[in-house]
């Protein structure tokens, strides 16, 4: 075997392995979302996460990859042409890695609108995210000739392209769907609706952290001649610093070290470091992760004051911390212009919010996005799927 062939084979193995790690993050999202919400909706959460990946992968094969990386570059805005209905076996590992990223951007929305959204409406929304909204943004940033890439915008592994996008789409969703019954008192005071299993939530976060090593280190897109250790190291430090900052931040704010905030602090730290995982010094990675966690706590409180209900904190974790991660690259990397990062944030937020809001409004007009009050109170497992996930412990009036 020639040296070049061996190097190519090693790169292929690394990219496929990284993609598999990112795919396993779907299990983490499912556990986090199910654990942070009520038991009566656990089956619905599982179905949404399963279909995120299943529908998302097929739609990304049919449409998304072509808009992102296929065919002709149309003014730096999107690809067009021979990439549709992807069949180029020489780029299969590249497609696989990008497909699992697309599915990740979609599944962020699931938890934010949990507990009150029609399943069939969700099935209508997911293909738009994986097939159009996300691919267009990834073309801007990661495709050769993308307009944000040409501007000097840098997002190594997706703080903005994946996480901020998912968080902004989630924000549009919760605006359209509205808060859960009982989340806010008549005077607007937020009321706690505890999730049914912090154990599930913690396991999900740890699975996400595990998969994040593939998410960030895999974004080298190869192993031969690439530094995969630095993004792996900053992934550990960013998540760890996020946990520590969220623990002490919640301790100061609430009078006790809050488990939920601490878990989401890990995720916020990971989201924050993702954009600069390959380039920021280790000490800076700690700082970025810690600040991301504190921003997340502040964003959660702000959303509650605005009467916006996000059961899992997706908007704060992915949207707010993702925005900080993109800015941090411009602040701490002297080779990146802060102005380019700001322009990128405005463009991604503007495109994502406008298109996501349009899709949610369309779904609401066509089939309605919200279940009835009685269906919400009885739980979506019963009303949408005719099951009890915990039949031994759930009792319903005859």
Image (tube, helix red, strand yellow):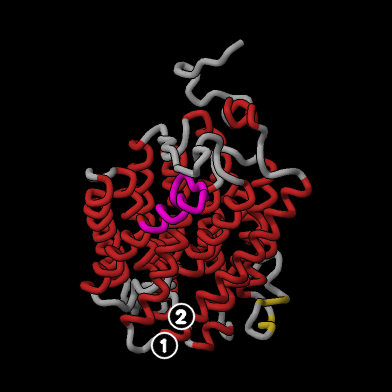
Is 366 situated left or right of 68 in this image?
Answer: right
Number of disc labels: 2
Write down the residue under mark 1. 337
Does the segment drawn in magenta span residue 300? yes
Using the image as rendered, state which of residue 88 and residue 308 is in the foreground.
Answer: 308
Q: Is residue 70 above or below residue 236?
A: below
Q: Is residue 212 above or below residue 72?
A: above
Write down the residue under mark 2. 341
Counting other residues with Cα less than 10 Å from the Cα at mark 2, is it few (<14), some (14-19), or many (20 or more)? many
Counting other residues with Cα less than 10 Å from the Cα at mark 1, is it few (<14), some (14-19), or many (20 or more)? some
* Disc 2 secondary structure class: helix
The span shown in magenta is: 298-313
Please provide percent x and percent y for residue 100.
Answer: 52, 58
Please provide percent x and percent y for residue 380.
Answer: 59, 32
Is 137 situated left or right of 198 in this image?
Answer: right
Residue 131: mark: none
Q: Residue at x 39, y 70 (%)?
A: 325
Please provide percent x and percent y for residue 359.
Answer: 69, 57
């Amino acid at each position: 075997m020639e040296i070049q062939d061996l190097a190519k084979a090693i790169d292929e193995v690394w990219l496929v392995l990284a993609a598999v790690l990112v795919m396993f993050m779907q299990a983490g999202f499912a556990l986090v979302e199910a654990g942070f919400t009520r038991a009566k909706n656990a089956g619905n959460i599982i179905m949404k996460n399963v279909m995120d990946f299943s529908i998302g992968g097929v739609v990304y094969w049919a449409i998304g990859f072509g808009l992102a990386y296929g065919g002709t570059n149309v003014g730096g805005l999107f690809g067009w042409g021979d990439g549709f209905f992807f069949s180029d076996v020489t780029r299969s590992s590249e497609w696989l890695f990008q497909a699992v990223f697309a599915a990740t951007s979609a599944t962020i929305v699931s938890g934010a609108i949990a507990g009150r959204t029609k399943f069939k409406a969700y099935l209508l929304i997911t293909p738009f995210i994986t097939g159009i909204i996300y691919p267009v943004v990834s073309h801007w940033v990661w495709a050769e000739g993308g307009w944000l890439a040409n501007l000097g915008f840098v997002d190594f592994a997706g703080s903005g392209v994946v996480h901020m996008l998912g968080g902004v789409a989630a924000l549009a969703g919760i605006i359209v769907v509205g808060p859960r019954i009982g989340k806010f008192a008549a005077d607007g005071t937020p009321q706690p609706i505890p999730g049914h299993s912090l154990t599930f939530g913690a396991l999900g976060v740890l699975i996400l952290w595990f998969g994040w090593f593939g998410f960030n280190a895999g974004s080298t897109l190869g192993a031969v001649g690439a530094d995969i250790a630095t993004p792996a190291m900053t992934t550990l430090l960013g998540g760890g610093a996020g946990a520590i900052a969220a623990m002490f931040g919640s301790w100061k704010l609430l009078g006790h070290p809050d488990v939920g905030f601490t878990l989401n602090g890990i995720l916020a730290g990971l989201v924050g470091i993702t954009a600069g995982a390959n380039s920021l010094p280790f000490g800076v990675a700690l700082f970025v992760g810690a600040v991301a966690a504190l921003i997340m706590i502040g964003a959660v409180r702000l959303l509650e004051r605005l009467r916006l209900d996000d059961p899992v904190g997706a908007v704060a974790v992915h949207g707010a911390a993702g925005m900080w991660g993109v800015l941090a690259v411009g602040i701490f990397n002297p080779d990146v212009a802060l102005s380019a990062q700001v322009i990128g944030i405005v463009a991604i937020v503007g495109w994502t919010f406008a298109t996501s809001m349009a899709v949610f409004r369309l779904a609401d007009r066509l089939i309605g996005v919200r279940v009835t009050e009685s269906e919400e109170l009885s739980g979506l497992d019963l009303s949408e799927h005719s099951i009890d996930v915990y039949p031994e412990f759930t009792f319903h009036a005859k």
